[in-house]
Amino acid sequence: MSDDAFIRLQERVFRAVEVLRNLQKQNASLKQEVEQLRRDLEELKKQSQFNSQMVERLQSDRLKIRARVERILKNVTALEEPSGESTLWAEKKNG
């Protein structure tokens, strides 16, 4: 093997080693990024679950408030009617 061929081979090996080191650095960086994305995903899942529970709670509260408002409107309507007093008192007694 001539000196020129040996030098070219040596240069190829050095370049291959350099490429390998760069790839290893990129791989380590990508692994860190993947781990961070996994942590972020878990946090987003928890937040989504919390938000879903909050929406369910607010919808339930809305239905309860709506029922109360409807009862109040019914009582107000009963007060406006001439015979509404007997209906209003009957509702209060029944509960």
Image: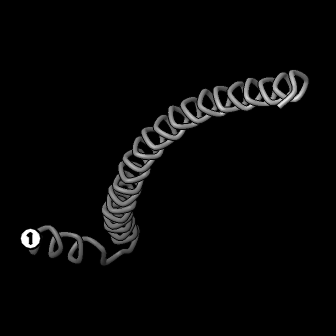
User: Residue reaching furthest right?
Assistant: 4
Is residue 31 left or right of 67 when viewed as pictured? right
Point 37% across, 67% down: residue: 70
* Quarter occupied by residue 85: bottom left
Q: Nearer the viewer, residue 75 or 60?
A: 60
Q: Nearer the viewer, residue 68 or 16?
A: 16
Say few, some or many: other residues with alpha carbon within 10 Å of mark 1 (under 14 / 14 to 19 / 20 or more): few
Is residue 59 left or right of 95 when viewed as pictured? right
- What number of labels is visible? 1
Label 1 sits on residue: 93
Q: Nearer the viewer, residue 12 or 51?
A: 12
17 w.r.t. 60: above or below: above
Element carrying mark 1:
helix
61 w.r.t. 3: above or below: below
Query: Looking at the picture, which amino acid does disc 1 mark?
Result: Lys
Q: Considering the image in quadrants, where does the C terminus appear?
A: bottom left
User: Residue reaching furthest left?
Assistant: 93
